[in-house]
Amino acid sequence: MSGQNRELAKKRLKEQKRKQRDRKKERSKRAKRSAKGKRIHWEKLDNTANLFPAIATHNMTNVYRISVTLQERIDKAALQQALDELLPVFDTFRVRLRKGIFWNYFETNQLSPPIVEMEQAYPCSFIEPYTNNGYLFRVSYYRDRINLEVFHVLADGMGGVNFLRELTYRYLQIKHPELADRTSVGLSDETSLNTEDSYLKNYRQGRAKGYKTARAVEVRGEKLPGGAMGVLHGYLSLPEIKRVCKERQISINEYLTSLLIYSIYREYLHEGTSKRPVAVAVPVNLRPYFDSMTTRNFFVMVSAVFRPEREERYTRQEVEEIVVASLREQINREHLEDLFSYNVSNQKNIFLRSVPMFIKILAMRYVYRSSARANTTTLTNIGGFSVASEYQPYVKRFHGMIAMSTGQNIKGLVCSFGDELVLNFTSTLRDVSIQRRVFRQLAEDGIPVTVESNGVYYE
């Protein structure tokens, strides 16, 4: 390295340290201002949330991201103001995680909101509470995009959607005062602040274990260097997908899940047999089945299973029929009730409740590793985003993505807005043949596809 380059490197390092000091000072000032006069209360974690602190690591973060892309560049100061004004209203997000003797719990976070920063790290990276004022979410931006990243202990996708939508509304009101004149500055009617534990409310005693833990096919291969996460967005026509699904008499979820399983069978198993099944975990939002509006977690996982046991090649139609039957057998109120009631029964067990937290953590990690490896991948559909009519001219699209987990090196997320559906894949593997096969099959079905990457596959 030349002397000139060394000097340049020193200047950059010095500038980075100065910015870090400035950020710490700003956090300290904001924390002191925010801590005055606020009432503290505590709240139990919901049944699913108890798991996430036990299994979260820097490599398996249990963080998901929801993003909104606007028609204009993001103003950092306005976004920070919007977050500062919104957070006190959202008890779900205005908490910090505390460790108890027997269970973790939430406590009101009296510190000021996290500092909004321009996106720098890979998506869904670990949220370190100690450098984030104790909060379990982060807000960042990049050009015209606002990112909300949430540690799953706080809320599932619905809770994140609620928060991001209201944050976007408030941001646009600040940037465009005429919007504030035409709309209420308070929360929109479609946003819930309900924080009940719907698992406990709808729990039914005496339900048997409703899921299996036999290991599934694991997609392996060369990893991307340096802990990188590869991201692929596929932009699809929602009307065209609906047309194709109507012709096949299946739902969008069934269509995309079967297509993903077929792509794994074709590209990874090369249409061969396997002693282990190809299984896709599909989160099911329980709110429509149990009349809930909670902003906490309220979902269960079912597994779409395909067993490539015969020597003769399976056609795509055969795979689709097997997968659709697998999903329809499981997605009904009675079976979904069995799944979460069994989990809640363990939480309510008097003996288990008295077991110290550190022993519970070891047990939860073991159970989680077994259940996670029972699935090859996960495909989450968080549904369609809706925006009030006065804000629609300012909003371009929404994205979503999820982090990796044990035994699952590729994951998918689906969301839609207007006439566009976005199919996202995140992966830590360099090979993208499975994702490429999915997009090719979509195109062959007559659905136009535009693919966008975060660029790590070309480095």
Image: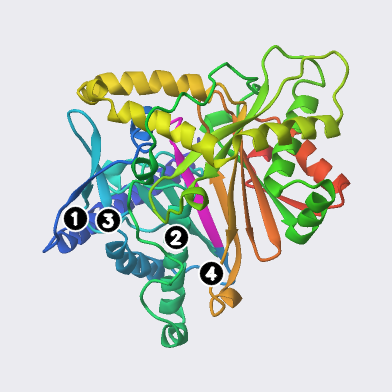
Q: Nearer the viewer, residue 186 or 13?
A: 186
Looking at the image, is 361 positioned above or below residue 310? below
> Does the magenta run of residues contain 67?
yes
The answer to whether the residues at label 4 and label 3 have Cβ atoms under 8 Å apart is: no
Q: Amino acid at mark 2?
A: Asn
- Of 195 and 70, nearer the camera is 195
Identify the residue position indicated by label 1 in the image: 110
Q: In the rendered image, which residue does mark 3 sit on? A: 22
x, y percent for residue 285:
52, 46
Closer mark to the observer between disc 4 and disc 1: 1
Which mark lies nearer to you, 3 or 2? 2
Q: Which dot marks residue 383? A: none
Label 1 secondary element? loop
Q: Secondary structure at mark 4?
A: loop
| Closer to the eye: label 1 or 2 | 2
Residue at 29% x, 30% y: name it.
348
Q: Which residue is mark 2?
A: 162
Give, as a single range, the part of the protein colored magenta. Answer: 58-68
Q: Nearer the viewer, residue 447 or 77?
A: 447
**Quick check: marks 4 and 2 in contact, CB under 8 Å?**
no
* Label 4 or label 2, whichever comes before in sequence order: 4
